[in-house]
Amino acid sequence: MTALSFVLGIVPLVVATGAGAASRQSLGTAVFGGMSAATFLSLVIVPVIYVIIQTLAERGIKRSDPRMILDMIKDWWRRFKERMREKIRVREEDHVPSTD
């Protein structure tokens, strides 16, 4: 919520006009992009890493077994891709026009 407020507060810098607009726009664009990227990473990447660590802890995998960790990540990625393909397939089936 705070990050969103900050990003929206930077919008006037991004669309600045008048004297010194070029420097305001460049600064605003850099801050807007950086904060948007940081917010996205904190909302997506951090929970994914948490799930991976939690799964490792539940399986009792030790740090000294990197192959097992890699296999677990590959398995998770494979299941994730399968779920996404299934969702896309279902959406495509829902939007196919009927030939009546």
Image (spheres, rainbow, N blue to C red):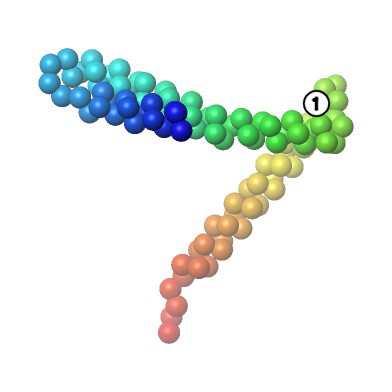
User: In which quadrant of the rendered view does residue 61 lie?
Assistant: top right
Secondary structure found at label 1 = helix
Residue 15 versus residue 75 in the image, above or below? above
Residue that protrudes farthest toward the left in the picture? 18
Instruction: Return the x and y of residue 13 as percentages of the image width and height.
Output: 26, 23
98 relative to 48, above or below: below
Q: Is residue 33 visible?
A: no
Which residue appears at 18% of the width and 19% of the height?
21
Give x and y (percent) for residue 39: 48, 29
**Picture quarter with the C terminus:** bottom left
Examine the rendered structure and indicate whether residue 2 appears above or below residue 20. below
Mark 1 crowdedness (10 Å alpha carbons): few <14, some 14-19, many ≥20: few
Where residue 82 appears, as percent x and y from the top left, is 65, 52
Picture residue at 63% right of the left edge, 48% below the top: 81
**Number of numbered tags placed on the structure image:** 1
Name the image quarter holding residue 27.
top left
Compare residues 50 and 83 and report the one nearer the observer. 50
> Residue, x 20% and y 18% (percent of image)?
22
Of 31 and 81, the residue lying toward us: 31
Please identify the quarter of the rendering in which residue 89 is found.
Answer: bottom right
- Res 3 seen here: yes
Q: Spot the residue most to the bottom.
A: 100
Indicate the position of residue 30 as horizontal and vertical percent values.
35, 21
Using residue 75 as the reference point, say whether residue 34 is left or right of it: left
Q: Is 81 situated left or right of 29 in this image?
A: right
Q: Is residue 66 left or right of residue 28?
A: right
* Amino acid found under the numbered disc labelled 1: Pro
Residue tagged by mark 1? 66
In the foreground, 77 or 26: 26
